[in-house]
């Protein structure tokens, strides 16, 4: 019988990686080409160079507030990039199940980005920041979601 390949996406707003589990006793192994960083440009819209505007009744100038949160936009773009790569791998039948692990805000962005086909493969979610946890310790944080 072919082992069930479970991928675990561990992400936050700045980095992500994918680990693979092949069943009890096999642990989680990193997938080398699925490690990501979110390189946010220094002068992204809404940064410190927002511009200034004159007050209508005097020569006083004020900074223009951004209409959207640049950090949230960056996180949403990063989540969309991660989901796009996972979708490519799903199409190639690289995994059978998917577990998402991310802090609450990033989990929300991932949920919005995941489409129907990939969404059917999501077998569990853990709201936690495990991006700095070593690979060999991740399974201990996934009790009840993953048998590794």
Image: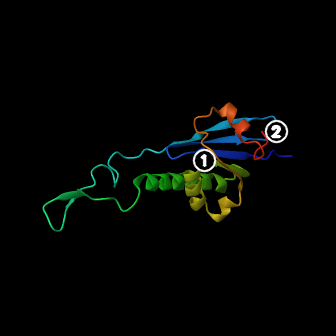
Place residue 67 in its image quadrant: bottom left
Badge number at residue 131: none
Q: In this view, does 26 lie to the left or right of 107?
A: right
- Residue drawn at (53%, 56%) of the image: 80
Q: Are marks 1 and 2 in contact (CB under 8 Å)?
A: no
Task: From the top left corner, tell me how far across and down residue 128 is, in percent.
Answer: 63, 44
Q: Which residue lies furthest to the front in this view?
A: 57
Q: Nearer the viewer, residue 54 or 71?
A: 54
Q: Residue furthest right?
A: 1
22 to the left or right of 44? right
Numbered circles on residues, count = 2
Near mark 2 (Cα within 10 A), the count class, few <14, some 14-19 or many ≥20, is few
- First along the sequence among labels 1 and 2: 2
Q: In x, y percent, where is residue 119? A: 67, 60
Label 2: element kind = loop
- The chosen color scheme is rainbow
Residue 33 visible in the picture = yes
Could you say where residue 98 lies in the image, as x and y percent from the top left? 69, 51
Q: Nearer the viewer, residue 104 or 26?
A: 104
Instruction: Name the residue rendered at 41%, 46% in the picture.
Output: 40
Give the Cα separation between the discs numbered 1 and 2. 23 Å
Frontmost of labels 1 and 2 is 1
Name the residue that disc number 1 marks. Answer: 102
Mark 1 lies on a secondary structure that is strand
Q: What residue is at 65 percent from the left and 33 percent from the top?
A: 135
Please give the residue where the numbered disc 2 appears in the rendered image.
24
**Observer-nearest of 7 and 134:** 134
List x then y, in percent, for residue 28: 71, 37
The C terminus lies in which quarter of the figure?
top right
């Amino acid at each position: 019988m072919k082992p069930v390949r479970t991928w675990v996406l561990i992400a936050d707003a700045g980095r992500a990686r994918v680990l693979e589990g092949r069943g009890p006793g096999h642990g989680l192994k990193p997938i080398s080409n699925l490690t990501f960083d979110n390189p946010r440009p220094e002068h992204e819209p809404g940064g410190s160079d927002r511009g200034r505007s004159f007050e209508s009744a005097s020569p006083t100038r004020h900074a223009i507030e951004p209409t959207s949160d640049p950090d949230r936009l960056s996180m949403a773009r990063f989540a969309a990039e991660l989901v796009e790569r996972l979708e490519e791998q799903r199409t190639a039948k690289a995994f059978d199940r998917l577990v998402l692990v991310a802090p609450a805000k990033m989990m929300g962005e991932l949920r919005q980005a995941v489409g129907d086909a990939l969404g059917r493969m999501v077998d569990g979610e853990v709201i936690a920041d495990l991006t700095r946890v070593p690979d060999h310790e991740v399974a201990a944080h996934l009790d009840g979601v993953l048998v590794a």
